[in-house]
Image: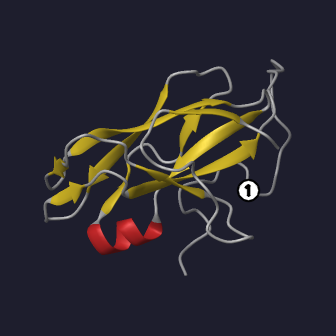
Amino acid sequence: MKIKVVNRSKHPLPSYSTKSSAGMDIRANIEDDIILLPRARTIVKTGLYLEIPVGFEAQIRPRSGLAIKSGVTVLNSPGTIDADYRGEVCIILVNLSEETFVIKDGERICQMVIAKHDIAEWVDVESLTDTERGLGGFGHTGSI
């Protein structure tokens, strides 16, 4: 699949780390370091503008290393970039740790996965088909 991209950042385009990687690392494109205090959130610019084909979305997901080592994650995970959005890709990060975290220019801050999706069409009905699970939810199957 080919995706049109305008790269107004100082960094190379996102790329896959290995042949089997699902996500591409996205880098911060900032002039000054961002100080992210404990439990604070911020928007980080990337300098990337995408034209995603209709029927696809770009999903923004946390980087596992950043999450486990620093407690920094993507707040609205996964974030969705729709096919008709043409603005700059910006990432909402949150610091869930007790330590201040410094975001530096060029730092890998998240992953982007390109995913196919369908368009749902609602069918208004009076009832739904019964299943064994039925109305059970929120842990109804028990614990480990």
Q: Tell me if residue 105 comes above or below residue 124 in the rendering.
A: below
Picture residue at 63% right of the left edge, 53% below the top: 136
Asked if one can make out residue 57 in the rendered structure from this viewpoint, the answer is: yes
Q: Give the amino acid type for the residue marked by disc 1 in the picture.
A: Arg
Corner quadrant of residue 132:
bottom right
> Which residue is rendered at x = 82% and y = 51% of the image?
131
Q: Can residue 135 be seen?
A: no
Residue that carries the numbered disc 1 in the rendered image: 133
Quarter the C terminus occupies: bottom right
Q: Residue 80, percent across and down?
A: 57, 36
Percent of width and height locating residue 103: 25, 54
Tell me which residue sits at (48%, 48%) in the image. 77
* Location of the N terminus (image quadrant): top right
Q: Residue furthest bottom?
A: 144
Specify whether 41 is left or right of 51.
left
Q: Which of the pair 144/19 is nearer the observer?
A: 19
Residue 29 percent across, percent down from the top left: 37, 43
Write down the quadrant of residue 21 in the picture.
Answer: bottom right
Image side of residue 94 versus residue 33, left or right: right
